[in-house]
Image (cartoon, helix red, strand yellow):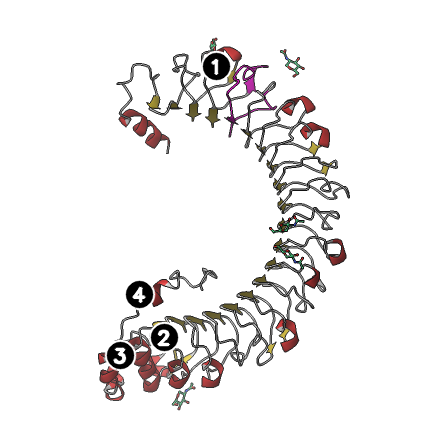
Amino acid sequence: MYLLYTFLVLLSPSHGFDPNCPGRCSCDSEESVQCYRLSEVPSSIPSTTKKLYISHSKIQHLQPSNFTQMLALEDFILLASGTESVENDTFKTLSTLKTLELWKNKLRRVPSALPASLEVLKLNDNSISVLHRSDFEGLKKLTILELKNNLISSLSPSTLSSLVSLQSLVLDGNNMETVDGPLALPHLTHMSMENNKLHLLPAGLFTSLQSLQFLSLSSNFLTHIPVNLPKSLLSLKMERNRLKMVSFPDLKHLENLSHLYLSENSLSSFDGAQLLANLTTLELSQNQLQMLPLRLPARLQKLDISNNLIQKVTVQDFQDLRDLKHLFLDNNIVSLFEAGALQKCTQLSNLALEQNLLLSIPLRLPGTLARLDLKGNAIQDIAERELKDLKQLQVLNLRNNKISALDLKALEVLPRLRHLYLDGNPWNCTCSLLRAREVLKAKGTDVRGGRCAAPAERQGENWMSSKKIMKQCEHHLHLTEKSKETKKKPKPEELSSIRINMDDDYYDYEID
Ligand SMILES: *[C@@H]1O[C@H](CO)[C@@H](O)[C@H](O)[C@H]1NC(C)=O
Ligand SMILES: *[C@@H]1O[C@H](CO)[C@@H](O)[C@H](O)[C@H]1NC(C)=O
Ligand SMILES: *[C@@H]1O[C@H](CO)[C@@H](O)[C@H](O)[C@H]1NC(C)=O
Ligand SMILES: *[C@@H]1O[C@H](CO)[C@@H](O)[C@H](O)[C@H]1NC(C)=O
Ligand SMILES: *[C@@H]1O[C@H](CO)[C@@H](O)[C@H](O)[C@H]1NC(C)=O
């Protein structure tokens, strides 16, 4: 990267031609100067410069005299340059400055006396431990404040009280244990305090944030969802905390909440969420749920309840979820899946049931399914009646089950099947299995077959490619010449409708 920068600077057409452009810098026509590997702020920066970008330099200290000639400066970005201190009032006179980014340096405090014109301040990846009230005084135009990955341990409302225009506040990756409230930031729409040490938040903390739409408190030690969240909230992230229960009456005023992320907590029940009437995405992976939640919100489109302890799926569980498109139930202990349990989900396109204890493919799955993952169950055979309605199915994963024989009829009923994963099963490599192989290939289905477990003389052979078995079964295969002629190429739109990684462990649920 470093070399590349240097190379670009040297190649830059302006370098060496523009007499006003300082060394190790490139200057373009839009009054923008970019410099790398400097040891000081160039004193010969043209006074018309609006944007100055410096990175990978060694500039320990900044002082007012370094900027006196920059009368038009709007954006100053100083990245990864080992800057430790900024003298008082260094930026004070830059009355046109809008963006100040001092990323990946060694600052221990927020530069003082920032100009009132500032709109964006990013001080991520420094060593700032305390925020002072005076740090942000007078910054009435500031809309974005980012202080990710510093050492800040507390936040008090008076520190931020000047920031009347603030829209986005990011404090991820600090040492915050407490936040005092209420925060009064009338235009704040995004707030993130991920990866801190928050145990408890005061009840009124968010009450006055009447524009807040996105709140993330993931990776903390919180045991409760904060009460009095603002009604404007659209998305709440509280993954990786210590939630044991959720009190829905405290959340029911969140009428616009559409995304709720609660994975990696300790929830053992989640009943009554129908109060969140507009919820479309719910993530509950890696909790301790033993049953599917009762009364899920009726507008859900995506439900991730993987990595729990769910044992059964019944008709009652999903009867109201008519908009559900993506359902993740993988890595549970489901052994009972009632026939028709998902029949009311007439939009369902993705069903993840891998790593459960199913003995057969569930009956009467919705015909809208495009992807069905049953990897790592204990399924012994595939029957036509299980698959016959799945006219949209493009991907079927049956890897690592206990299937030894293929009923060709069962697979011929899947007109759109493109990817079939069958490896990791104890195949009995009869010649009729090989015929199934020919038919699937002729249909244009990409099949991962795996190895033979029987008969003894074919053990370990790959039944999709073994020349040995082909030869032994030659007389069984003459029938397939005809199907070879009719081998159709998949239509382009069928191929493009699904973006699939060759490794099926990559779960691409965005297929429609
Ligand atoms: C800032 O300006 C002073 C002189 O005014 C100079 O000695 C110093 O090297 C400059 N510092 C940087 C980091 O450019
Ligand atoms: C810099 O400003 C702070 C207050 O913003 C003040 O406490 C400190 O004494 C000042 N330092 C110098 C060297 O003037
Ligand atoms: C909910 O969303 C609607 C539509 O975007 C908006 O008009 C309404 O003000 C929102 N409600 C609240 C409480 O923010
Ligand atoms: C769902 O959101 C819409 C606007 O997006 C809003 O008008 C409606 O009141 C909300 N529904 C409920 C039941 O809160
Ligand atoms: C494999 O299939 C053949 C023919 O159907 C059958 O005779 C044999 O018992 C099967 N072997 C195993 C191990 O299931």
Q: Are marks 3 and 1 in contact (CB under 8 Å)?
A: no
Q: Relative to 299, is 509 on the left or the right?
A: left
**Vertical arrangement, residue 179 with respect to residue 464, above or below:** above
* Mark drawn on residue 67: 1
Give the structural element (helix, strand or loop) at label 4. helix
The amino acid sitting under disc 2 is Gly
Badge 4 crowding class, 10 Å Cα cut-off, few under 14, some 14 to 19, many 20 or more, is: few
Q: Relative to 48, is 329 on the left or the right?
A: right
Q: CA distance from mark 2 to mark 4?
A: 36 Å
Q: CA distance from mark 3 to mark 1?
A: 78 Å
- The first of marks 4 and 1 along the sequence is 1
**In front of the other: label 2 or label 1?**
1
The amino acid sitting under disc 4 is Pro
* Mark drawn on residue 492: 4
**Vertical arrangement, residue 198 with respect to residue 316, above or below:** above
Q: Give residue 55's quadrant in the image.
A: top left
In the image, the segment drawn in magenta is 85-111
Give the structural element (helix, strand or loop) at label 3. helix
Residue at figure coordinates x 73%, y 58% from the top left:
248
- In the picture, the quarter occupied by the N terminus is top left
Badge 3 crowding class, 10 Å Cα cut-off, few under 14, some 14 to 19, many 20 or more, is: few
Q: Are marks 2 and 1 in contact (CB under 8 Å)?
A: no
- The first of marks 4 and 3 along the sequence is 3
Q: Which residue is mark 3?
A: 468
Q: Is residue 268 visible?
A: no
Q: Position of residue 78 (x, y in %)?
A: 47, 25
**In front of the other: label 4 or label 3?**
4
Q: Is residue 140 visible?
A: yes
Look at the magenta stretch and give its main secondary structure. Answer: loop
- The first of marks 2 and 4 along the sequence is 2
* Mark drawn on residue 460: 2
Q: CA distance from mark 2 to mark 1?
A: 73 Å
